[in-house]
Image (spheres, coloured by chain):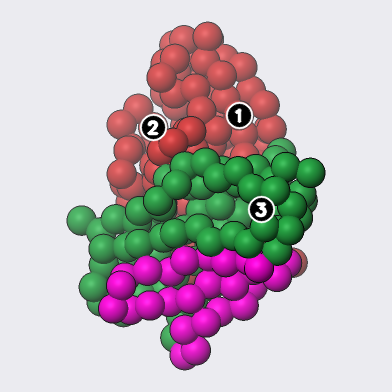
Chain colours: A red, B green
């Protein structure tokens, strides 16, 4: 079974803090994704990566950056967290268009 | 831009009722279609998918979906729901840029 893990299930940070969300997959997938999930808005793509060191902006990249130094690891970075970044963050990796998701990180920014 | 529309944000049913969740997409080319489910406190998981072939697709837990090209639809169905089907259901389509476009989700509540 594909396993996608995320470093934290719950995270509470203060406005202005730098936040790192880590995601690791164990199936050698080339594509990895970061989404945020908000009620009534579904999943919105923040960034994705199709290879090591390659990244592409999704629909809502503002306020976020990403890092893909190794194939299995895709990190989402909030340079200066703001309250409107309080959300559920989902990481996924994909093979043949089918995406496999991690358990999510619920981030609260105070 | 391509879009996916799920008609209902909330659906409440009694156990044993039949279920149909609507999904329409705007992309006119060759499509890959998905339904994902998120049970309370759990991560998103694939329910079923359509890439090609038989437009009636069977998934896990008794769910099925029918791809109707002329209607740009991929509705999810289950003949008799159970309390354990309480979850949020997401429809998604792969667009021309090979990105998944997601619907807003439908929260399904099954009354015991």
- Residue A30 visible in the picture: no
Tell me, for residue A106, which label it has, or none: 1
Asked whether disc 3 touches disc 1, contact meaning CB atoms under 8 Å apart, the reply is: no
Q: Quadrant of residue B61?
A: bottom right
Which region is colored magenta? Answer: B53-79
Q: Quadrant of residue A22?
A: top right
The mark that comes first in sequence, 2 or 3, is 3
Q: Residue A45 lies in magenta, yes or no?
A: no
Q: Residue at x 46, y 10 (%)?
A: A15
Q: Residues within 10 Å of mark 1 (few under 14, many from 20)?
A: some
Residue B67 vs residue A28, the one in the foreground: B67
Q: Residue B56 lies in magenta, yes or no?
A: yes
Q: Residue at x 53, y 72 (%)?
A: B65
The answer to whether A61 is drawn above or below residue A5 in the figure is above
Q: Which x, y percent locates residue B29?
A: 25, 76
The mark that comes first in sequence, 1 or 2, is 2
Separation (CA) of disc 3 from disc 1: 16 Å
Q: Secondary structure at mark 1?
A: strand
């Amino acid at each position: 079974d594909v396993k996608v893990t995320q470093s934290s299930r719950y995270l509470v940070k203060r406005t202005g803090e730098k936040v790192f969300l880590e995601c690791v997959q164990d199936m050698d997938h080339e594509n990895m994704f970061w989404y945020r999930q908000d009620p009534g808005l579904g999943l919105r793509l923040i960034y994705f990566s199709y290879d090591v060191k390659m990244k592409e902006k999704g629909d809502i990249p503002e306020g976020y950056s990403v890092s893909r130094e190794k194939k299995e690891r895709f990190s989402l970075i909030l340079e200066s967290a703001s309250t409107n970044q309080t959300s559920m963050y989902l990481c996924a990796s994909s093979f043949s268009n089918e995406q496999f998701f991690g358990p999510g990180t619920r981030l609260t920014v105070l | 831009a391509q879009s996916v529309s799920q008609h209902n944000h909330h659906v409440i049913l009694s156990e044993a009722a039949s279920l149909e969740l609507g999904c329409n997409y705007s992309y006119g080319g060759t499509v890959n279609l998905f339904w994902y489910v998120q049970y309370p406190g759990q991560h998103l998981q694939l329910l079923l998918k359509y890439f090609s072939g038989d437009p009636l697709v069977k998934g896990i837990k008794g769910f099925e979906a029918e791809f109707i090209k002329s209607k740009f639809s991929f509705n999810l169905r289950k003949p008799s729901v159970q309390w354990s089907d309480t979850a949020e259901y997401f429809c998604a389509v792969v667009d021309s840029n090979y990105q998944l476009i997601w619907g807003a989700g439908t929260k399904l509540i099954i009354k015991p």
